[in-house]
Amino acid sequence: MEILGLLSDGVMVSLMPINVMLILIGVTLGLFIGAMPGLGSVNGVAILLPITFLVPPNSAIIFLAAIYYGAMYGGAISSITLGIPGASTAVATTFDGRPLALSGRASLALVTAALASFIGGTISNVLFTVFAPLLATVALIFGPPEIFALMLLAFATFVGLGGDDIPKTIFSICLGLVFAAVGFDEISGAPRLILFDINGFLHGINFLVLAIGVYGIGEMIWTIENTRGEITTTEAKMSLKGIVRDSKEGMRRGWKGTMIGSFLGFFVGILPAAGATPGSLMSYGVAKLVAKNPKEFGKGHPGGVAAPEAANNSASTGSMLPMLTLGIPGSPTTAILLGGMVIWGLTPGPRLFTEQPDFVWGLIGSFYISNVFALLVNLAFIPLFIWMLRMPFTVLAPLIFVLSVVGGYAATQDMHDVWLMLVFGFGAFFLRKLDYPLAPAVLAIVLGPIAEPTLRQSLLLSSGDASIFLTRPIAGPITVIAIILILLPVIKAVVTRMRGSRENAA
Amino acid sequence: MRLAEILTAGILALLSIYLMWKSTELNVGYIRGEGPGGGAWPFWLAGIMLICTGFIAFNWWRRTSPPSQSDDVLLDGYGKRTLVLVGGGLIAFIGLVNIISMYGAMAVFLFYYLRFLGRHSWNLTLILSLAIPTTFFFFFEGLMRITMPKGLGFTEPFYNFLYSIIY
Amino acid sequence: MTITKRMFVKLAGATALAGLIAGPAAAWEPTKPVDFVIMAGAGGGADQIARFIQSVAEKKDLTNRPLVPNNKGGGSGAEALIALNGAGDPDHTILVTLNSFFTTPLRQENLGIDVQTFTPVAMMGVDPFVLWVHKDSGITTFEQWLEEVKKGDYVMGGTGKGQEDSLVITYLEQAFDLDIKYIPYKGGGAVAKDLAGKQIMATVNNPAETKGFYAAGDVVPLLSFSDERMPAFPDVPTLKEKGHDFSYYNQRAVVGAPGQSEEAAAYYQDLFKTIYESQEWQDYMASESLSPLWLSPDEQKAYWQTQVDRHKELLAAMGE
């Protein structure tokens, strides 16, 4: 029970007046940074790191944790209200969050996201507190073959996500995967697919450039064109009673997704090569698979908001684990935090927990507190975000375009990417009109850069023998499950078609 | 729609072929004992894309996909107008960034959109198209320390003055 | 956010130095945020060092305009070199480099980059390389390791072909007639993790990226590629002691864009000298096992030339 003592000390430190102030400021700031498309927790943490030298180290850590949590909550806000995933971790949130907002139920989506985030954060904090050192060894067991098998599983959970048009869906997935290969081949160390020999492609195609292009520009132009400019989002009303009602409904319909997201997100999050994005995508896919009525997903089901939101918060805490216990960052944000720890004179690694218990438990304690405050601050700001949605569309639309351009630039600080984003936007507009599903391309560009190198590293390890994915004790079962899941719809389709043709013949 | 469907499939097929061709700059084969070469991943995936466009064309011919059955035009008069006014506005916006800076271009775009597409009042238009870039400037440059493009040299004295305020 | 009040006396020392030549009134100062380009993606070893430097400047309030970190790691740093080469405002553009500063222009000649056109600013230190194995392998000496490798099927990991560690491994292969299978990873941290997880058998890595596992006793250093034994690893022999005249370091240096004015270069040289001499940086070098190597601007240019020539040979040996 030594842990509990240390943890309560950490919590007490967080509750000192100056620290509560810092948490409130940090959470609010993080919320807005996260809500801004193109900016995420990584920006918030990176920019505020130097400022933290002005306050004592303990407060600095708490401040950073607060920003981190705030940004994680904020990611859902742009996904729901603007339809643009502000960070790769919030892509899956758009699938159901956006339809809910369009049907006037933005407050339901926002409340569900906040509550699911809170539960995901809390569950992961408990898991972290109890199992941290043990889970560190799990992260080490996952080598390239295991990670690749996991990516295969992530794709498998998404098979049902595309539209009805199979060739167009497959086209979209492959397009995303090829775009993910642009820039640099990690394995041969050579530049690759520098399209039209434009130097801007040297750094590859950033996920945000495609996502903002597709959702922020293509989808917006499509909406303006399709609704003849007379867009009518059902008036979103806001009242305290409404929030209470929405919380009840969100939890009633989203609890399953929340649980799936909390646990799956955490376990995928602790793997340094995977992280929060695959965690939230897989949680969405699994929540859909096990739902009573999977058809409701994608049309505005609270479960489809709860699962990825619980997962990305849970995974963010999870990704702290390899950083603290192994000294390996699981995400760019934790990488920056790692740099911060080095600056504070701490050595992350297996011995951190025994040598610096004050720091570790102070940090974990501040996670608990930040999570609570993030929930409260988020709920308090929901009326503001709803109010934004009630602006006339001819004000909201140019604002979204401006946010897209600025966000596209902020992501990589290169004008090339802003132009590329515009090209993607126009392309997405036409493809959208012709029923090409584009979400699979956006997912593929996130998973591709993890899947390809791990595939090839595995094959290098096994001297080109593909059976490595089946013979390793952990990779094997994951691969088998993934393959079954991928083939399931195909088998189903073949069976129904055979039945159908038999009936037709009869 | 019907014409657009087959034209798009054709363009995407060309894109796939280009990507396949570009991939061959690296080894697209399977290296014995090492696994696939550096170009294999994009090459074969682009190959699948090409096959998909073939199926899309086949479905077009069979008239099974909704766009291939539709006789509507892809873009009617309103659609074309929207695309030119909104899309053209965006192109101008991004083009202006390198001339009159991100914030200047933003102000011009907001002014154009609010006043001419949104038909809002002069007051609202002017307030928003000045307030938003100003807010963004302080948010990005002051708080987030992300510098946006400043356009050609003539904007420099102005921004240097603003910097002397925020730093 | 509280905008910290800038103290204009902050550069008193530096200004006084410049004042000897030009007089304080003429001392150049940045008029806008400085584009602080990092030749690597976010999160790697080079990125951490760059952000550490930036935070020291911030903490000590050394600059009147902020250094804004800008990661441009694309194409092994080609992206950063192109950005510097075509910088619109060379006086406000500086770059944190590593050895890809030398190798990338050699490996991608079509970029048309000549590193000698860049402006020398500061050599902040050099990062030595060490050969590591997992403790469960039972190997404790370099000789045992050689025996083990000669049995065949030996797998090592690194940060990619043509990268620093692969050059060292290639040297070992040729000098000792070894055949090693090399698995490229995205960064030094991932390499260290897969060594600790026994996915790969050995690595050549900077101590900074492996030290957590070393402290926990998971990995064992066998050999260092430094000129002399490293203070942090006094019992680890160098390759030079084994009779091979070879040492290899990763440079941690700051350079200015080509065409930077002399006044601006002098400003940055003073700035980074102040950072270099700060207690924070000295402590950082000690804790991350960096070796100090302070060079004057002229010495830096000479150092670049020797490094370019050296890497030409190393890359040629690799068959690149």
Image: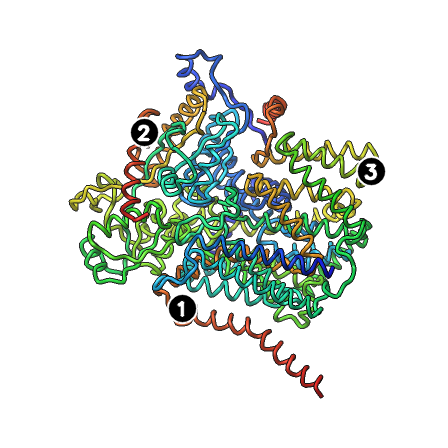
Q: Residue at x 57, y 33 (%)?
A: B147
Quadrant hosting residue A472: bottom left
Task: For residue A132, say whether it is visible.
Answer: yes
- Percent x, y of residue C305: 31, 32
Q: Amino acid at mark 3?
A: His
Separation (CA) of disc 1 from disc 3: 63 Å
User: To which residue does mark 2 refer?
Assistant: C294
Q: Secondary structure at mark 1?
A: loop
Separation (CA) of disc 2 from disc 3: 62 Å
Quadrant hosting residue B84: top right
Q: Nearer the viewer, mark 1 or mark 3?
A: 1
Q: Residue at x 61, y 46 (%)?
A: A421
- Percent x, y of residue A194: 49, 47
User: To which residue does mark 1 refer?
Assistant: A466
Crowd rating for badge 2 (residues with CA inside 10 Å; few <14, some 14–19, many 20+) = some
Task: Give the farthest residue toward the left.
Answer: C243
Separation (CA) of disc 2 from disc 1: 50 Å
* Chain of the residue under label 1: A
Q: Amino acid at mark 2?
A: Trp
For this view, does C270 lie left or right of residue B82? left
